[in-house]
Amino acid sequence: MRKDQKVFLGTLAVIMVAICGYTAMKVLYNDEQAATGPLLPVQEQPAEQPSEDQKPVEKEKVYVNVFFIGQDENNYEVYKAVKREYDEAVDGEKIKFAIDSLIMGPKPEEKAYGVYSEIPSGTRVISITERPEGVIINLSSEFEAGGGTDSTYKRIYQLIKTAKRNTEKPVYLYIEGRKADVIGGEGIMLNQPLNENSLDG
């Protein structure tokens, strides 16, 4: 082989090696880009907040007023309304819940504020019937037992005030299933339906 041929072949071999090396580097570089991508910082986004329409609506609290007896700033006895939280889905009819609460009496924390009840211990709610024409509150005979005239007047007013605050319908008091036109051992006349003037005779 002539000298010039050897030089040509050597040069050609160097060129081929260079081309192969360049091609291999290009393939490796492109594969790396495809596999990992550029290392760019990821933008942080705040967590999606529920819209006003999606937020749960907090149920408004409802209360009934139950009347007990306490003292004012001058130490005179007065009727005091105590709030009791009421849920129709749990407690049923509003008037029934209010009367049941009245008969059960003040809670310990309410007694601590000086309120008490003249309704005799042992009094039971036999039934409370609500009709379009009115409400019948049927109590056990313990309601009219003992305590004297003053106590009887107070317990009746507790009942009247509690009932009238929690229904707009006429309210009638029954004792053991009979309409209570006369109540207590003293024979107190009771005008019905119940109102603030029911004891005026």
Image (tube, helix red, strand yellow):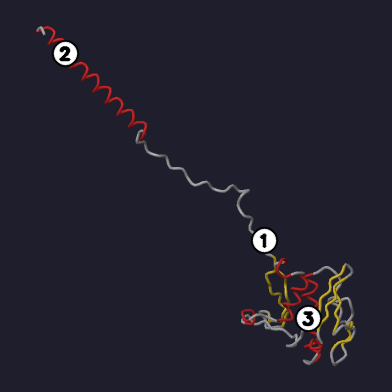
Cα separation, mark 2 vs mark 3, equals: 117 Å
Quarter of the picture containing the N terminus is top left
Residue at (73% x, 75% y) in the render: 66
Q: Secondary structure under badge 3?
A: strand
Residue farthest toward the front in the current orientation of the protein: 1
Query: Which residue was labeled with disc 2?
Result: 11
Residue 43 horizontal side relative to residue 87, left or right:
left
Name the disc covering residue 125, or none.
3
Q: In this view, does 200 lie to the left or right of 120?
A: right
Vertical relation: 92 (above or below) 139: above
- Element class at badge 1: loop
Q: Quadrant of residue 75?
A: bottom right
State which tag comes first along the sequence, 2 or 3: 2
Alpha carbon of mark 1 to alpha carbon of mark 2: how far? 93 Å
* Place of residue 124 in the rendered image (x, y in percent of width and height, measured from the top left): 77, 83
Q: Looking at the image, which is closer to me, 2 or 142?
A: 2
User: Closest to the observer: 19 or 196?
Assistant: 19
Residue sitting at x 73%, y 79%:
102
Q: What residue type is labelled 1?
A: Glu
Residue 153 x, y percent position in the rendering: 80, 85
Give the foreground label among 2 and 3: 2
Residue in front for this viewpoint, 35 or 139 = 35
Say what amino acid the circle numbered 3 marks. Answer: Val
- Disc sitting over residue 16 in the figure: none
Q: Relative to 126, is 91 on the left or the right?
A: left
Tell me the residue that label 1 is attached to. Answer: 60
Would you call the spot at circle 3 few (<14 residues within 10 Å), some (14-19), or many (20 or more)?
some
Tag 2, which secondary structure?
Answer: helix
Q: CB of mark 1 within 8 Å of CB of mark 3? A: no
Task: Give amino acid for label 2.
Answer: Thr
